[in-house]
Amino acid sequence: MSSCQAWRSSAAHSCVLVALVCVAALCLVSLVREALKIDGVRDKCVLVTGCDSGFGNHVARQLDRRGFQVIATCMTEKGCSDLEAAASPNLRTVLLNLTDGASLDRVVELVRSVTGARGLWGLVNNAGRSIPIGPTEWMQVEDFKKVLDVNLIGMIDITLRLLPLVKRARGRIVNVASVMGRVALTGGGYALSKWGVESFSDSLRRDMRAFGVKVSVIEPGFFKTAVTNVDLIEADLLRLWNRLPQDIKDSYGDKYLENYVKAQSFAMSILCSKDISKVTWCMEHALTSRYPRTRYGAGWDAKLVWLPLSYCPTFITDFVICALFPVPKDTRVVGPSQVDVSST
Ligand SMILES: NC(=O)c1ccc[n+]([C@@H]2O[C@H](COP(=O)([O-])OP(=O)(O)OC[C@H]3O[C@@H](n4cnc5c(N)ncnc54)[C@H](OP(=O)(O)O)[C@@H]3O)[C@@H](O)[C@H]2O)c1
Ligand SMILES: *[C@@H]1O[C@H](CO)[C@@H](O)[C@H](O)[C@H]1NC(C)=O
């Protein structure tokens, strides 16, 4: 080997070594940053919406055990009493229907009196609904509104009302979106609402940055809770199908609903994880870490399938999503005034 070749190969080795050391150092720094926690949890108050069941119920108890002063909002009296029975006396519950202005007024008043000059450390916007969800053509505009009014307008409403209190605490806002806020897997208001949660959170994060308020978005994949309950979704799909005009039903074919429901149940049975602590871990991290992440993907399906799919070119995303659902029987569009030449 000439001395020139030897020099080149040792330079290449040094470059690789330096690159490896840099990557290792970056990983270490981000691990340490992720692990740094805030202090004074016991003096901090956190409000979580939608605590009757699912993620909200789980995280309210988790934050209570962690020492936070939790205000958990529920839809029903039973939701409130069951949660109080399962938590410490520090946890307060309050009824909240996000689409009811008077109910919002009462909750804001309560939060103001409980938090006083400290302000509200955390607002976890978790409440939401998925139904009606299904093929776009089966929907009426009211079906979209039912979901958008809770998941998006309701979430914006409570956030704007509580923002002055969060600002006072230089606190945190944690918004539960979904992988459906990144890829629209089905029609109806759900994906739209979560898309809205994503962009509302982005603008809020930038607008509140100077005031020390941090905004995080949680993007869960599929988890076994009431929003992914296939029996409830199927019952509502049947309602949508039954009110369709006959010519639209014919264009899908009489087996379509059955096949659609089968495909959905099959996909949900594979995808839905029972371990909802994966989601509540993200919520707790966003509230307790000194450097919370902007986005948290929760669940293996989110990390390995849906979030990567959201970065793919549209033709790939469309191919994958269309493959999940059955194809309507009659894919030619034959309107009542057109002559279907193939049948003459
Ligand atoms: N499970 C998943 O796979 C998944 C995936 C991604 C994102 N998410 C999101 O995670 C959040 C929590 O859902 P979850 O899966 O834990 O389901 P969940 O058990 O149904 O929790 C949703 C909660 O929101 C409440 N809620 C519904 N409408 C409301 C309203 N108008 N005002 C106030 N509260 C209302 C529900 O009360 P009622 O039960 O009385 O209706 C329920 O307590 C939702 O935003 C959902 O979109 C879930
Ligand atoms: C929530 O409030 C809206 C508006 O007042 C009302 O129409 C709806 O029935 C309420 N939902 C429940 C479950 O009480």
Image (cartoon, rainbow, N blue to C red):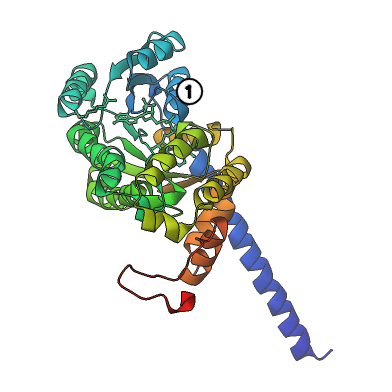
Q: Quadrant of ligand 2?
A: top left
Which residue is at a point 38% across and 19% down the rendered structure image? Answer: 42
Which residue is at a point 54% across and 46% down the rendered structure image? Answer: 258
Ligand 1 is within 8 Å of the C-beta of the residue at disc 1: no
- The residue nearer to you, when weighing 187 against 300, is 187
Residue 156 drawn at (x, y percent): 23, 41
How many numbered marks have been drawn onto this rendered protein structure? 1
Picture quadrant where residue 109 is located: top left
Which residue is at a point 29% across and 17% down the rendered structure image? Answer: 94
In the picture, the quarter occupied by the N terminus is bottom right
Callout 1: 10 Å neighbours few (<14), some, many (20+)? some
- The residue nearer to you, when weighing 300 against 270, is 270
Which residue is at a point 53% across and 43% down the rendered structure image? Answer: 32
Residue 85 drawn at (x, y percent): 44, 8
Q: Which residue is mark 1?
A: 62
Q: Residue furthest right?
A: 1
Which amino acid, mark 1?
Gln
Q: Is residue 234 left or right of residue 266?
A: left
Q: Is residue 39 left or right of residue 94?
A: right
Q: Is residue 18 left or right of residue 71?
A: right
Residue 143 drawn at (x, y percent): 30, 44
Secondary-structure class at tag 1:
helix
Visible residue check, residue 39: yes
Q: Is residue 1 left or right of residue 312?
A: right
Residue 10 drawn at (x, y percent): 74, 78
Visible residue check, residue 217: no
